Image (tube, helix red, strand yellow):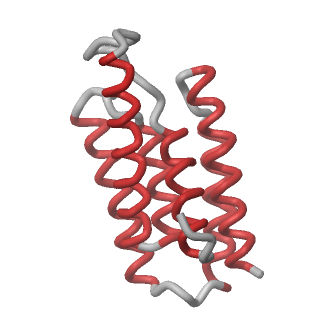
Amino acid sequence: MAESTMTISMGLLLLFCGIQDTVKKKVYLWIITLGAFIVIACLPFCYSISIADRICGLALGLSVVVLSKATGGKIGMGDGMLLCITGLGLGFWSNLELFAIALILAAIVSIFLLMLRLADRKKSIPFIPFLLIGYVILMLSEYGIGV
């Protein structure tokens, strides 16, 4: 029950943040905090992933937060914070897979926009929607729906 709650909560968190990121180009901290509290509250009841794996998943998100600081915000702080939350819920390898899928999807869309001259190199695109799509792909493949 707790794992299902965590899975659904992370999906809803990514959905709400993805909509905000697309529409307003920013994500409200209170939504991320609420999602983090729900995921953390479910952790003591979830046994499928070790604590060490979850901490490593958190570290992946923290490294994106550090990159956000180092690049002066060219990488969104909200992206890193969401990867911290998904890292706690998914563990390191699944979070790394989620991040890789999202990066590949963002690259494909960026190339498409550049080819059609709808954007240039300096145009930023929201990343959280790609995390949401990556999360859906990950969940579909995990639950055997075949992607």
Image height check: is 139 above or below 25?
Answer: below
- Determine the residue located farthest toward the right in the rendered image: 1
Image height check: is 43 above or below 34?
Answer: below
- Nearer to us in this view, 90 or 143: 143
- Determine the residue located farthest toward the left in the rendered image: 70
Name the side, left or right, on which 5 lies relative to 110: right
Name the side, left or right, on which 87 lies relative to 41: left
Quadrant where the N terminus sits is bottom right
Going 47% across and 48% down the picture, which residue do you hit?
81
**Horizontal and vertical percent position of residue 43:** 61, 77
Going 38% across and 82% down the picture, which residue do you hit?
52
**Horizontal and vertical percent position of residue 114:** 31, 18
Going 36% across and 63% down the picture, which residue do you hit?
96
Image height check: is 44 above or below 41?
Answer: below
Going 45% across and 54% down the picture, which residue do you hit?
83
The tally of labels here is: 0
**Horizontal and vertical percent position of residue 15:** 66, 44
- Nearer to us in this view, 64 or 118: 118
Please identify the quarter of the rendering in which residue 48 is found: bottom right
**Horizontal and vertical percent position of residue 18:** 60, 37
